[in-house]
Amino acid sequence: MLPMDRVIALELQLLGSHGMAAHAYGPMMEMVDAGTLRPDRLVTDVIGLDAVPEALSALPSAAKGGVTVIEPHRAPTGSGW
């Protein structure tokens, strides 16, 4: 488990990828453009930065699949903006 307090304190950026060779990106993007692949169907949540700590805390017990998109400029939850 990552020590998130240190990640935040040191203002680290987390990046990652999952098992796809660079040469496959062109054909994959063509499939997205054609509507053959629908990556939007993988997105289960869109949250702002204020909701990230709670989402990270829920990871060990989360039984759902999908991708959570973090929008840094999204208005804080419950702000009424």
Image (cartoon, grey):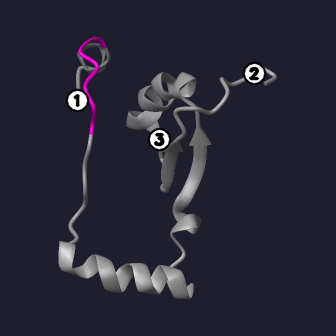
Q: In the rendered structure, does residue 12 fall within the stretch colored magenta? A: yes
In the rendered image, which residue does mark 3 sit on? 62
The secondary structure type at the circle numbered 1 is loop
Magenta region, residue range:
9-14
Viewer-nearest of labels 2 and 3? 2
**Pointer 2 and pointer 3: residues touching (CB < 8 Å)?**
no
The secondary structure type at the circle numbered 3 is loop
In the rendered image, which residue does mark 2 sit on? 78
- The amino acid type found where label 3 is placed reads Ala
- The amino acid type found where label 2 is placed reads Gly
Q: CA distance from mark 1 to mark 3?
A: 15 Å
- The amino acid type found where label 1 is placed reads Met
Q: What label does residue 1 carry, if any?
A: 1
Viewer-nearest of labels 1 and 3? 1
> In x, y percent, where is residue 28?
37, 81
Residue at 48% from the left image edge and 53% from the top image edge? 67
Q: Residue 35, relative to residue 50: is it above or below?
A: below
Q: CA distance from mark 1 to mark 2?
A: 29 Å
